[in-house]
């Protein structure tokens, strides 16, 4: 059973978002389209969106996550930006609406680009990884933009590349179709954490669905064929799994954080050296320099001392965070590799996310 231990982190991150609202809304015209046509209307829409955003943050702080989602969605419709999208995803996660959280946060990672802060990206990735173990996923090995997917009569919750369908564990009626063809129209049952692959392809002639085997025959037109591979094995040549992508992303962020720690540590050493040089200058000036000149040197020495302390503490924090992120990223890559190798034997791997990184446990 996965431990939902990133809840506290979600709350803290939402407060960071709230603190930066004014500057973000002032720039949001570059991040998305506005609801108004002219400049005055655009500014009015942004101001109105800001009101809904702040109302959503207030409801979030009161743990009224459903009410916060409604406010954030209204704000996003008026003025789309990554912070509002991030908050919507985190609210869904807090409500344990894992399919919705997966979809929204996956789009946040896809669309925010370099604008999002590393803290928000890290939290979104952790929530995505945690949510994956709580949902039943159908993975389409092949797909097409024209294909539509319904689950229980409603548009499916899907990944940005439309290759993954996220559902609450249990029984659902899944329909995959286009204007001309029906690829899949049946009731499926899946467990928590299960990933089931379907290969959809178009072929001439009559076709059908049968245990992973393609059936074709005479006839006209284009008829869909769905292959249903057995087990949860990752096919050769298939797209990388979300866990593997998250592992590499975390590892990359960790590398950047560690480099930042090294640079900051170097600056701390520089501040200490400057302080020591000023101390020598102060000692040598005793008896030759005026009291005012000596006081000026002493003040500069103290400034470098304070700067060195700040730099040293920052470097220590960056090294700690970088180490935790590296451990989490490596653990994700290890889990993904083990799951792939153990799929044939029926083994299982479980994991939970904590603020310190990824805790891996399982049976093989």
Image (cartoon, grey):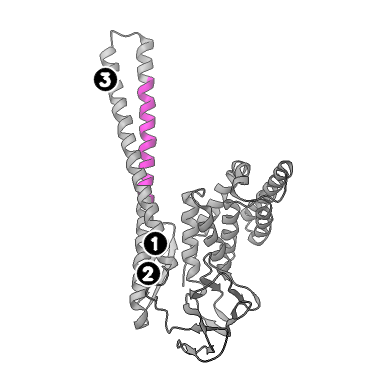
Asked if one can make out residue 143 in the rendered structure from this viewpoint, the answer is yes
Give me the residue at 59% from left, 75% from top: 149
Look at the numbered disc 1 and give the secondary structure of its residue: helix
The answer to whether mark 2 and mark 1 are in CB contact below 8 A is: yes
Give me the residue at 35% from left, 51% from top: 255
Asked if one can make out residue 364 in the rendered structure from this viewpoint, the answer is no
Residue 52, percent across and down? 69, 51
Q: Which residue is mark 2?
A: 336
Sequence-first disc among 3 and 1:
1
**Residue 64 marker:** none
Give me the residue at 53% from left, 56% from top: 111
Look at the numbered disc 3 and give the secondary structure of its residue: helix
Look at the numbered disc 2 and give the secondary structure of its residue: helix
Sequence-first disc among 2 and 1:
1
Residue 97, percent across and down? 58, 68
In the rendered structure, which segment of residues is drawn in magenta? Answer: 299-321
Q: Quick check: 73 above or below 225?
A: above
Taking the image as shown, residue 146 lies to the left or right of residue 233, namely right
Residue 70, percent across and down? 68, 59
């Amino acid at each position: 059973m996965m431990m939902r231990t990133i809840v506290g982190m979600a709350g803290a991150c939402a407060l960071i978002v709230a603190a930066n609202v004014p500057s973000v809304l002032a720039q949001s015209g570059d991040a998305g389209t506005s609801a108004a046509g002219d400049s005055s209307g655009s500014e009015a829409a942004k101001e109105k969106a800001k009101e809904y955003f702040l109302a959503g943050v207030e409801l979030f702080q009161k743990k009224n996550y459903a009410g916060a989602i409604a406010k954030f969605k209204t704000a996003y419709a008026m003025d789309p930006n990554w912070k509002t999208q991030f908050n919507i995803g985190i609210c869904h996660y807090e409500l344990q609406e894992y399919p919705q959280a997966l979809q929204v946060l996956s789009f946040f990672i896809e669309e925010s680009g370099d604008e999002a802060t590393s803290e928000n990206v890290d939290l979104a990735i952790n929530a995505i990884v945690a949510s994956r173990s709580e949902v039943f996923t159908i993975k389409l090995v092949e797909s097409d933009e024209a294909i539509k997917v319904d689950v229980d009569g409603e548009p499916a919750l899907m990944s940005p590349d439309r290759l993954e369908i996220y559902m609450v564990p249990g029984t659902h009626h899944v329909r995959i179709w286009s204007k001309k063809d029906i690829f899949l129209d049946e009731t499926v049952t899946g467990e928590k954490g299960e990933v089931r692959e379907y290969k959809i392809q178009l072929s001439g002639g009559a076709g059908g669905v049968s245990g992973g085997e393609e059936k074709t025959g005479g006839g006209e037109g284009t008829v869909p064929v769905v292959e249903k591979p057995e087990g949860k094995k990752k096919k050769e040549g298939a797209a990388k799994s979300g866990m593997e992508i998250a592992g590499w992303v975390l590892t990359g962020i960790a590398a950047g954080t560690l480099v930042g720690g090294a640079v900051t540590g170097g600056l701390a050493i520089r501040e200490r050296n400057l302080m020591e040089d000023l101390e020598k200058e102060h000692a040598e000036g005793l008896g030759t320099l005026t009291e005012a000149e000596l006081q000026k040197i002493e003040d500069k020495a103290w400034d470098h001392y304070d700067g060195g302390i700040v730099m040293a503490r920052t470097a220590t924090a960056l090294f700690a965070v970088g180490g935790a992120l590296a451990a989490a990223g490596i653990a994700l890559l290890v889990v993904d590799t083990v799951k792939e190798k153990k799929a044939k034997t029926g083994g299982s791997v479980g994991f939970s996310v904590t603020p310190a990184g990824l805790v891996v446990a399982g049976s093989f």
